[in-house]
């Protein structure tokens, strides 16, 4: 099993010649990169469908969606990102076209288009595909109201597509609100991944989100469950970040990944170049953290699959 411990420190006699915080950080990154090079992850063959959700804005939801997708593709998984956010930030980060005249997820939800008609490959990897969003999706909440089986539009389209094109992981990025787009995401998924920022008020609104998940479980999708929590925007220099991390781990000991995502300039810069941080600077601290998180997620799926076989 592959695990990365935040407490791992370089020895005083490290390769950088001095025992300073910067030297220790560089040595730590170097050892973590080497550990990732030796990782061998096997995907079970069963498709895992995640919706990445948090009604609180600014928690790194879309950033998490695209970087985990890219990292999982780098591990050898076939990954599909469904961009359900009208802003289209996931589409931008994955380098796919999503201008107003592009066939998009809007045409699937409101029109008669199939996912196979709109999915585009990301230039980052042949294993990484994206169903893009366009500005038209902004009006979809209202237009969905009159649609037949409005809560199941995405689920049915996804099931038809996966029957033809197998994927290891599907990641649905939804808007930071509980409307019909998010309900479609919850109904289509089996797992919920919640990014939580390591800052004050981190758990604000989380109880409401968990209540919404339970409501969807009861009325629309019994398979839906909270499987993963990822701590983001972690600043190791502050006591607050550690306190928030400890509080979240105490509340959700089974769901929280060991890996945390640090605050990173590289992670923030990457989307402006139409890339994930994995492609933009794969050796940066943010990229390494997302790669480690992807390994944890893949291994959890592998362990779960083995448990079912026993």
Image (cartoon, grey):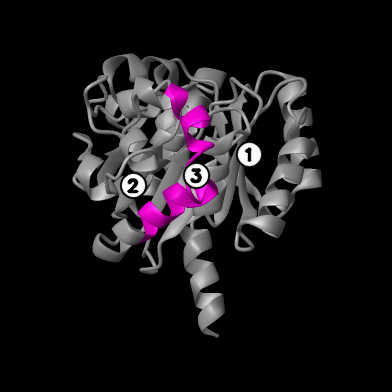
Q: Of discs 3 and 1, which sits in the foreground?
A: 3
Q: Is residue 226 left or right of residue 32?
A: right
**Who comes first in sequence, dot 2 or dot 3?**
2
Question: Can residue 180 be seen in this snapshot?
Answer: yes
Q: Quarter of the image holding residue 27?
A: top left
Q: Is residue 100 magenta?
A: no
Q: CA distance from mark 2 to mark 3?
A: 17 Å
Depth order, front residue of 63/40? 63
Question: Can residue 28 be seen in this snapshot?
Answer: no
**Residue ID at (48%, 34%):** 64
**Residue ID at (31%, 23%):** 92
Q: Which residue is mark 2?
A: 80
**Residue ID at (50%, 76%):** 306
Image coordinates of residue 87 in percent, x first then y, are 42, 20
Q: What quarter of the picture does the C terminus occupy?
A: bottom right
Image coordinates of residue 166 in percent, x first then y, are 29, 62
Q: Of discs 2 and 3, which sits in the foreground?
A: 2
Q: Is residue 152 magenta?
A: yes
Q: Which residue is mark 1?
A: 7
Instruction: Give the extent of the magenta segment.
Output: 138-159
Image coordinates of residue 264 in percent, x first then y, are 48, 19
Q: Residues within 10 Å of mark 3 (few under 14, many from 20)?
A: many
Image coordinates of residue 145 in percent, x first then y, are 54, 36
Identify the secondary structure beneath mark 1: loop
Depth order, front residue of 216/38? 216
Q: Residues within 10 Å of mark 1 (few under 14, many from 20)?
A: few
Q: Which residue is mark 3?
A: 293
Depth order, front residue of 12/162? 162
Identify the secondary structure beneath mark 2: strand
């Amino acid at each position: 099993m592959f695990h990365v411990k935040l407490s791992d420190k370089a020895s005083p006699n490290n390769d950088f010649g001095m025992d300073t915080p910067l030297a220790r950080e560089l040595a730590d990154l170097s050892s973590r990169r080497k550990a990732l090079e030796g990782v061998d992850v096997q995907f079970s063959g069963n498709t895992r469908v995640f919706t990445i959700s948090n009604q609180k804005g600014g928690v790194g939801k879309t950033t998490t969606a695209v970087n985990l997708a890219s990292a999982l593709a780098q591990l050898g998984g076939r990954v599909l990102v469904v961009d359900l956010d009208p802003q289209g930030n996931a589409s931008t980060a994955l380098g796919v076209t999503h201008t107003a005249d592009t066939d998009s997820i809007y045409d699937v939800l409101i029109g008669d288009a199939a996912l196979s008609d709109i999915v585009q490959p990301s230039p980052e990897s042949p294993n990484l595909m994206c169903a893009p969003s366009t500005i038209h999706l902004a009006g979809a909440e209202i237009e969905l109201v009159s649609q037949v089986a409005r809560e199941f539009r995405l689920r049915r389209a996804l099931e038809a597509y996966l029957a033809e094109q197998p994927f290891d992981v599907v990641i649905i990025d939804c808007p930071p609100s509980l409307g019909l787009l998010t309900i479609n995401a919850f109904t289509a998924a089996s797992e919920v991944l919640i990014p939580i920022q390591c800052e004050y008020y981190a758990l604000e609104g989380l109880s409401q989100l968990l209540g919404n998940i339970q409501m969807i479980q009861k009325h629309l999708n019994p398979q839906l469950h909270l499987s993963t929590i990822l701590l983001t925007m972690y600043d190791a220099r502050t006591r607050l970040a550690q306190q928030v991390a400890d509080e979240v781990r105490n509340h959700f000991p089974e769901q929280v990944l060991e890996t945390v995502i640090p605050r990173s300039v590289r992670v923030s810069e990457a989307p402006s170049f139409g890339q994930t941080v994995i492609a933009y600077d794969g050796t940066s601290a943010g990229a390494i953290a997302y790669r480690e998180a992807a390994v944890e997620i893949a291994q959890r799926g592998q362990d779960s699959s083995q448990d079912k076989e026993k």
